[in-house]
Image (tube, grey):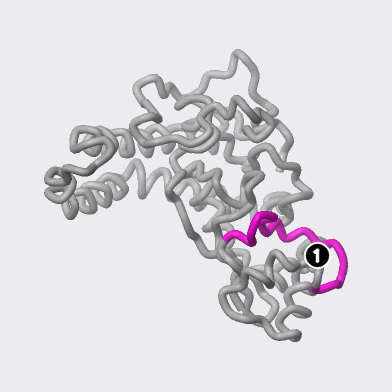
Amino acid sequence: MAGGRDGGVRGVDLTYSDDSVESYSNIFDNAVTKPTDEDKSRLISTIKGLNEGTDIEKYVDVDEVLRYLACNVFLVNLDSYLSSNCHNYILAENNGVISMLPWDYNLAFGTMDSESAEEAVNYAIDTALNGVSAEKRPLVTKLLENEGYREKYHAYLRRIAEEYAAGGLFDRTVDNAAAVIDSYVKADTTSFYGYDAFKEGIAALKLFASLRAESVKAQLDGTIPSYQSDRNDSTVLTDASSLSLDKLGAMNKGNKENPEKRQKPARS
């Protein structure tokens, strides 16, 4: 069974409330495939087991979710389970074991709710949640409070930073994709921004990945605190002054109307 992409207005935070099917209508009413009564009962039991936090591998595909989490945190994809919207993923369940499938990354790379390029580039990897309490996001919380799982999460982050971003694969992937559409973008007379903005966006995208890799590696090595609560005004962060997030697009930049949504120091 696969849950809906965003769970409707309420999102799908995977917190357990009770055993009533009606309490999880945001999941079942938005399911990609129609769940049976047995499916519903099994998923509720899984959510309960997840929230209890014991024997977690019985209820969660831990390795797959850790990979998903590492990718989202590296990309600073806040329009996701990590923040108050709590959506833009597909909840997959198979025989009582849940996992998360990626969906909708148009506001990744710190382009949603980041105050500045420096804030986005230096997003704290161990304060993975953005403006929401740990108990509201049990799938992240229960995994990262386990030392072994947290180490594996860190290993995936290091692999993304060193092999994919710093190793050049990210740049090659971007360049290959850009080459496919370059002539079409150049010939498009209806574009909102134009060909020059397209080229600037490509450069900014690669620069973000490079700077983010630098910050993530520094956080993993302890040069930059990996928890937001351990940082202060004297903390030296990765310099992102050369990056303009506007080149990548933005939504709720700075989030001035609702500052509570921005990353807070509460540990997840």
Question: Can you say whether 55 is above or below 140 in the image?
Answer: below
Nearest the eye: 93 or 267: 93
Say if residue 220 shows up in the picture: yes
Q: Amino acid at mark 1?
A: Thr
Q: Is residue 143 left or right of residue 78?
A: right
Residue 210, percent from left and from top: 36, 36
Picture residue at 40% right of the left edge, 30% below the top: 245
Residue 75, percent from left and from top: 46, 44
Say if residue 148 shows up in the picture: no
Q: Quadrant of the N terminus?
A: bottom right
Q: Quadrant of the C terminus?
A: top right
Q: Label 1: few (<14), some or many (≥20) within 10 Å?
A: few
Does the magenta stretch mainly form a helix, a strand or a loop? loop
Residue 213, picture quadrant:
top left
User: Does the magenta-highlighted stretch encompass residue 207?
Assistant: no
Q: Which residue is outermost to the top?
A: 234
Q: Is residue 176 left or right of residue 254?
A: left
Q: Which residue is mark 1?
A: 54
User: Does the magenta-highlighted stretch encompass residue 15?
Assistant: yes
Residue 264, percent from left and from top: 68, 32
Picture residue at 51% right of the left edge, 38% below the top: 112
Give the residues drawn in magenta, as a range.
6-21
| Mark 1 residue element | loop
Picture residue at 78% right of the left edge, 79% below the top: 41
Question: Can you say whether 96 is above or below 266 in the image?
Answer: below
Nearest the eye: 122 or 136: 136
Picture residue at 81% right of the left edge, 62% below the top: 16
Q: Is residue 130 left or right of residue 52?
A: left
Q: Tally the marks.
A: 1
